[in-house]
Image (spheres, grey):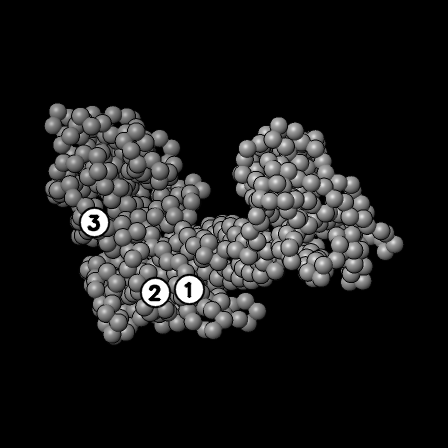
Amino acid sequence: MKVARREFPPTAETAGEARAFVNETLREWNAENSADEIILLVSELVTNAVIHAESTLELTLRRLPDAVEVVVADRVPERAVPKAGPLVVDSSSTSEEGHGGLGLGLAAAIASTWGVSYSTNDKAVWFRVNDPETTDRTQHSDLTPPLPTRPARNHQSARPNRWSALDAALSARLSLPDLLDRTVETTRSALGGDASYIALATTDETEWEVRAATGLTNGPWRPFRSRTEETFPSATPAPGAVINDDLMIARAHRGRLAEAGMRSLVTAPLIVDGRITGLVGVASRRVRHFGDAAAHRLQEAADRIALPMERARLAEVELSRRASLSFLAEASDLLTSTLNEQMTAALAAQLATSRLGTWCAVHSTSDLGSTELVHAIHRNENNNDTLKTLMTKLPPAEQRQPRPLWSREALAENGLDDELTLEVAQSPAISIPLVAHSRELGRFTLGKETGEDFTREEVDIADDLSRRVSSAMENARLYADQTSMSEALQRSLLPAKEKEPVIPGVDHAVFYRPADERTVVGGDFYDVFATDGRWCFAIGDVCGTGPAAAAVTGLARHTLRALAHEGFSPAHIMHRLNLAILEENTSTRFLTMLYGEMVPLGGPGDGMRIRMVSAGHPLPLRLNQKGEVSTMGTSQPLLGAFDDVDFFTETVEATSGDVLLAVTDGVTERRNGSAMLGDEGLVQLFSHCSGLTAQAVTVRLDRELESFAPGGHTDDTAMLVLRFL
């Protein structure tokens, strides 16, 4: 009987050193027929002992006449080995309460016999693997380790499956990342390598992404992409396993593998329907470590996982596609929720940094071609000022392929060569023009941290997002232009505050609010102006709202002023205005109007004589000093409806202390559900305004209207208040 024994410290390198020790020992004993199974079991048991026992390990191999026996012992007997159950691969079970690894499960599945022995100073997990070429299958009971904790299990039948762990992982329906991790661990153990990795084709199959690896780095593993010649050992992918005896002259990830100390490599392609969909590789720190047998075994594993791996990859691609569509749909909803260009840029930058990159900047280009930074944001708030300074001084040019946007020379010339700026400026980035209807509106720039890179899918999503940002930004500009025109039009329809006349003995105030808060153009209007010896006032309401109603408003206001300055009576002015509206108005827009002229009764404080016409308009209300409210005048036909109507002028007197209120139907028809304010409601509200200034009356009424029907201004609203001192 041959015996080999060696002690190992509980370190991360122990598993690899144990595999190498077992591999060399079995080669010396000419017992390589079962080497794959033995190395796999040793790797799992040693790894479990390092993690859970954290003590010096002793590895013992015995060459029996018909088997190889292995004992893995540690010096912590009080930590019992978890009971072995069915071989189920679950990468989420990593605590001591879980399965604790696949060691005992693999022993039960692969070994001919196995068991666990406890003593005062140590505990040992042992197993035997029968030599498949030996015909004598009798057991040697005198060589069985003492005190097994469970009965020995004999599997005297055919040669064990060397890829049992891989088959178990495939049957466990793991997620793609878990399946990839289990594959690289299993292939490394089975071939006695020091590192293993697996690369899969990208969605468009133009690049290859190394999705999982073990043994290449000490820190967290991060997937990376590479070109074909960097992924495959040969210049072009070819079916069949390939051996690289010296990575110093090989193509396959030679940089990363060589940096990790690897010197030899064996790779096998994953082939589905004659198409290469991936590559699995196992590397060693020794030159010429792998032979034809290892290449054959690895290709066998690749053939097992190729189809399940491709199915899992396609499922992942579909999930990613759905996530991208969901992201873009959400982005569209958010971008269309605002008509402000600043807010559009801020939302676009926030969305991009939440899903696609580390930082984002949005520039705006004016009609004259000048560029201005609208918004910039970095995930690290400490870098925001640096990013804004960089984007302001050096607006980027178009660049759709991920790479640094600026050279070090350009940064230095502009005094931007500090460490933090260089870190941001040298990171990979893309800059996409924001174009709508062949007009460049700005630029959408997205970047990542140094060392990261954009995937092809991320670039495509960014390009799609930029088109949605372009559309939203164009809508915001069109709305801004429309608002600007509306404001200009409304300014022409309403008198400027600074140009309103000062009326001796009269405190007056006006109020106006359009039905649509997004535009200031409406069908209601008011006017207060002076003529020779008279002070005139008007308030009107065109049927409907918006620009079409505003056109009639403009006609009425300017015609009214022209006729009033000619000295015509209120009745004659209404007659002429009615004819003008009938001649010019082709959209059947009717107009109600209250027009009046005031002249003093005597000296200051004696009140005013008012000559007026109410053409279909709500009659004005008068509030006296006793708090009593009454109507004034008589309702006459509206304007723009009939051409054969006659108007007459009424004369009323307003004395000191009286307050006159004229409103449009946007006030009286204010609704709260089925309840309407009406004339009676307005009278009640107005009766509580005694002693208030004219401006205070409008403020009080506006507040009371909002209290009666919050947000219920569905029609244009105008109020005119005259308080006689």
Q: Which residue is mark 3?
A: 16
Q: Choose between 325 and 246: the one closer to the eye.
A: 325
Q: Position of residue 274 (x, y in %)?
A: 49, 63
- Quarter the C terminus occupies: top right
Label 2 sits on what residue type? Met
Characterize the local packing of mark 1: few (<14), some (14-19) or many (20 or more) Cα atoms within 10 angstroms: many
> Residue 124 sits in which quadrant?
top left
Q: Disc 2 to disc 1, how far (Cα)?
A: 9 Å
Label 3 sits on what residue type? Gly
Q: Choose between 442 and 708: the one closer to the eye.
A: 708
Q: Residue at horizontal 49%, vertical 67%?
A: 441
| Secondary element type, mark 1 | strand
Q: Residues at badges 2 and 1 in contact (C-beta under 8 Å)?
A: yes
Q: Disc 3 to disc 1, how far (Cα)?
A: 54 Å
| Secondary element type, mark 3 | helix
Q: Residues at badges 3 and 1 in contact (C-beta under 8 Å)?
A: no
Q: Which residue is mark 2?
A: 391
> Residue 95 sits in which quadrant?
top left
Q: Earlier in the sequence, mark 3 or mark 1?
A: 3
Q: Is residue 557 left or right of residue 314?
A: right
Which circle marks residue 242 in the picture?
A: none
Which circle marks residue 363 in the picture?
A: 1
Q: Residue at horizontal 37%, vertical 36%?
A: 87
Q: Earlier in the sequence, mark 2 or mark 1?
A: 1
Q: Position of residue 318 (x, y in %)?
A: 51, 52
Task: Tell us which disc is closer to us: 3 or 2.
Answer: 2
Q: Position of residue 220 (x, y in %)?
A: 27, 50
Q: Is residue 146 left or right of residue 523?
A: left
Residue 311 visible in the picture: no
Q: Residue at horizontal 21%, vertical 64%?
A: 418
Label 1 sits on what residue type? His
Q: Residue at horizontal 64%, vertical 52%?
A: 535
